[in-house]
């Protein structure tokens, strides 16, 4: 079946698979085709990135690239839904990619067994339509933000601490990560986290990615969601443009007024 001939066709088997997510209030047929055409980078694929990658694969994003270094260790298993007791000691990315492939035969999953450096992140950003950023370190999150901005693609950033999750949706003309964090947030090597908040935040990150890629609903552009499960409140923060975003908007405006 083919709604828009410029987009990849969906087979009867794919239409059957996605029947519950195509229709009023969810995705159009064309939106599903757009998902099939899309490539998303998810880095890393731990407590948040794992559920994010899983939701993207299940939803039918055509190609999902996962990047994560290191081996699966016991403390990972309180939240890493793609892991298992049997996988302890194995490299996470290839093992998780295998698990993801077993979930949906209609999509392609690529594994990168390390965290991309600056150059690799830039190259990857050129190959993908959107980045879901789930690293624990701010340096990595900023690297992905820079790469996404250079490639002109959206970035959905997910972070967690304890029972709190934050979600930030930025993209061309819609803020950057520095708008949310003018100062570097504190970092702990072995920070506390409960798997339920990791999975919830990762799943919401995937939902925003699905909306943006398929052209469905209203993406949370330029907003940060804070879900504090410990205190029991949710807050949406409208990001204010940082100096770089103000300068970028200013140069766009002056270019437009000179036309
Ligand atoms: Zn900014």
Image: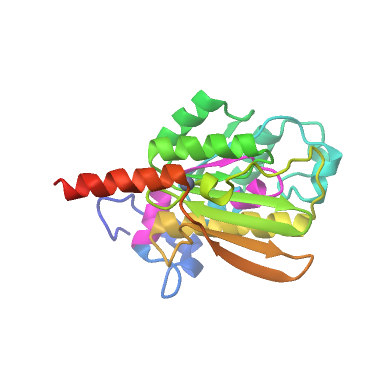
Query: Percent from the top left, x then y, of residue 18?
Result: 48, 62
- 184 lies left or right of 28: right
Viewer-side residue, 129 vs 100: 129
- 183 lies left or right of 231: left
Viewer-side residue, 187 vs 229: 187
Question: Which residue is located at x 46 percent, y 30 percent?
Answer: 122
- 230 lies left or right of 117: right
Viewer-side residue, 140 vs 247: 247
Query: Percent from the top left, x then y, of residue 80?
Result: 74, 47
Colour scheme used in the picture? rainbow
Res. 106 in view:
no
- 250 lies left or right of 139: left
Residue 36 vertical placement versus 93 (above, below): below
Q: Quadrant of the N terminus?
A: bottom left
Res. 117 in view:
yes
Residue 39 vertical placement versus 26 (above, below): above
Question: Which residue is located at x 57 percent, y 26 percent?
Answer: 117
Q: Is residue 41 magenta?
A: yes
Q: Is residue 154 magenta?
A: no
Residue 25 vertical placement versus 174 (above, below): below
Q: Quadrant of residue 13?
A: bottom left
Query: Percent from the top left, x then y, of residue 195?
Result: 77, 55
Question: Which residue is located at x 73 percent, y 43 percent?
Answer: 186
Residue interval drawn in magenta: 30-52
- The residue lying furthest to the left in this view is 259
Question: Which residue is located at x 15 percent, y 45 percent?
Answer: 258
Query: Percent from the top left, x then y, of residue 32?
Result: 41, 58
């Amino acid at each position: 079946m083919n709604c828009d001939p410029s987009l990849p066709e969906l087979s009867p088997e794919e239409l059957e698979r996605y029947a519950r997510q195509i229709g009023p209030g969810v995705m159009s047929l064309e939106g599903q085709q757009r998902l099939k055409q899309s490539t998303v980078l998810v880095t890393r694929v731990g407590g948040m990135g794992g559920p994010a990658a899983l939701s993207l694969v299940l939803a039918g994003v055509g190609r999902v690239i996962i990047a994560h270094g290191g081996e699966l260790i016991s403390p990972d298993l309180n939240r890493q839904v793609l892991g298992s007791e049997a996988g302890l000691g194995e490299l996470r990315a290839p093992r998780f990619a295998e698990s993801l492939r077993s979930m949906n035969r209609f999509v392609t999953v690529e594994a990168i067994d390390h965290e991309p450096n600056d150059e690799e992140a830039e190259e990857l950003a050129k190959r993908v339509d959107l980045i879901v950023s789930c690293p624990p370190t701010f340096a990595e999150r900023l690297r992905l933000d820079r790469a996404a901005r250079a490639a002109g693609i959206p970035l959905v950033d997910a972070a967690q601490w304890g029972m709190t999750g934050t979600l930030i949706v930025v993209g061309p003309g819609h803020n950057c990560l520095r708008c949310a964090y003018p100062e570097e947030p504190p970092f702990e090597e072995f920070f506390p986290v409960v798997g339920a908040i990791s999975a919830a935040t990762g799943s919401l990150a995937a939902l925003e990615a699905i909306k943006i890629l398929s052209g469905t609903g209203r993406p949370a552009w330029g907003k940060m969601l804070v879900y504090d499960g410990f205190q029991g409140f949710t807050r949406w923060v409208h990001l204010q443009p940082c100096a770089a975003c103000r300068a970028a908007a200013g140069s766009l405006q002056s270019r437009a007024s000179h036309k």
